[in-house]
Image (cartoon, rainbow, N blue to C red):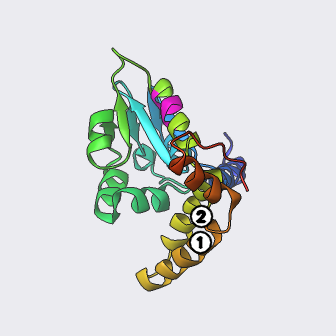
């Protein structure tokens, strides 16, 4: 790619990852194979990451005399902590799926002899879909907003979000279904 096109490309990728991160629904990245550089930066924009045992993940840009520019420096730091993020970005080290899980970069590793990262992601999505959509949407919003605040400020955000979820039809349906010992039928309101 010609040098003059790089800033625009990276800017568009950064915006795409931000848009992905800001979706009101949970997002899951299924990582199978190689997720390096921009590919990992896209996965970092997801709420949950599932990797296959053969997956390899990293931000090796420093080996090309650049660094992650589509949000990787900031998102990785928030996910695994500043010291580990610095180590991975400064060294450009590529992680196995097991090592990525150990440091909290991926939520779980799918054993390819049994299942795929894609199938585990679908199973996780099915579990999420059993919850009340209003509660999940508000929980994601509260978590994301609160992560950028002090604890007292974030607890206030949680209080307001909880007050909002108490007013939903889904909350009433969830409690009614629980007392009637049946699966809830949520309407998203």
Q: Is residue 84 left or right of residue 167?
A: left
Q: Secondary structure at mark 2?
A: helix
Q: Name above or below for residue 76 compared with residue 158.
A: above
Q: Is residue 153 left or right of residue 161?
A: left
Measuring 45% from the left and 51% from the top, which residue is drawn there?
65
- Please tell me which residue lies in front, 106 or 170: 170
Q: How many marks?
A: 2
Q: Name above or below for residue 44 compared with residue 56.
A: below
In x, y percent, where is residue 64? 45, 45
Q: Are marks 2 and 1 in contact (CB under 8 Å)?
A: yes
Measuring 58% from the left and 41% from the top, which residue is drawn there?
129
Q: Is residue 122 visible?
A: yes
**Mark closest to the chain's N terminus, 2 or 1:** 2
How crowded is the residue under tag 1: few (<14 C-alpha within 10 Å), some, or many (20+)? some
Q: Name above or below for residue 153 compared with residue 45.
A: below
Measuring 53% from the left and 77% from the top, which residue is drawn there?
159
User: Magenta region, mostly helix, strand or loop?
Assistant: helix
In x, y percent, where is residue 21? 60, 54
Asked if the stretch drawn in magenta spans residue 111, the answer is no
Residue located beneath label 1 in the image: 161
Q: Is residue 70 visible?
A: no
Mark number for residue 174?
Answer: none
In x, y percent, where is residue 35? 47, 35
Q: Nearer the viewer, mark 2 or mark 1?
A: 1
- Please tell me which residue lies in front, 22 or 152: 152
Mark number for residue 141?
Answer: 2
How crowded is the residue under tag 2: few (<14 C-alpha within 10 Å), some, or many (20+)? some
**Which stretch appears magenta?**
120-124
């Amino acid at each position: 790619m010609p040098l003059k096109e790089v800033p625009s490309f990276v800017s568009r990728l950064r915006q795409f990852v931000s848009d992905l991160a800001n979706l009101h629904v949970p997002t899951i990245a299924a990582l199978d194979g190689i997720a390096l550089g921009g590919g990992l930066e896209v996965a970092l924009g997801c709420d949950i990451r599932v990797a296959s045992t053969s997956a390899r993940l990293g931000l090796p840009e420093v080996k090309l005399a650049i660094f992650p520019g589509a949000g990787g420096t900031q998102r990785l730091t928030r996910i695994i902590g500043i010291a580990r993020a610095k180590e991975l970005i400064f060294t450009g080290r590529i992680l196995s799926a097991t090592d990525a899980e150990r440091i909290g970069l991926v939520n779980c590793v799918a054993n390819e002899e049994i299942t795929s990262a894609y199938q585990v992601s679908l199973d996780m999505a099915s579990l999420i879909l059993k919850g009340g959509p209003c509660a999940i949407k508000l929980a994601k919003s509260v978590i994301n907003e609160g992560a950028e605040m002090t604890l007292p400020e974030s607890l206030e955000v949680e209080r307001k979000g909880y007050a909002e979820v108490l007013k939903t039809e889904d909350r009433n349906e969830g409690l009614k279904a629980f007392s009637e010992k049946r699966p809830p039928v949520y309407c998203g309101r």
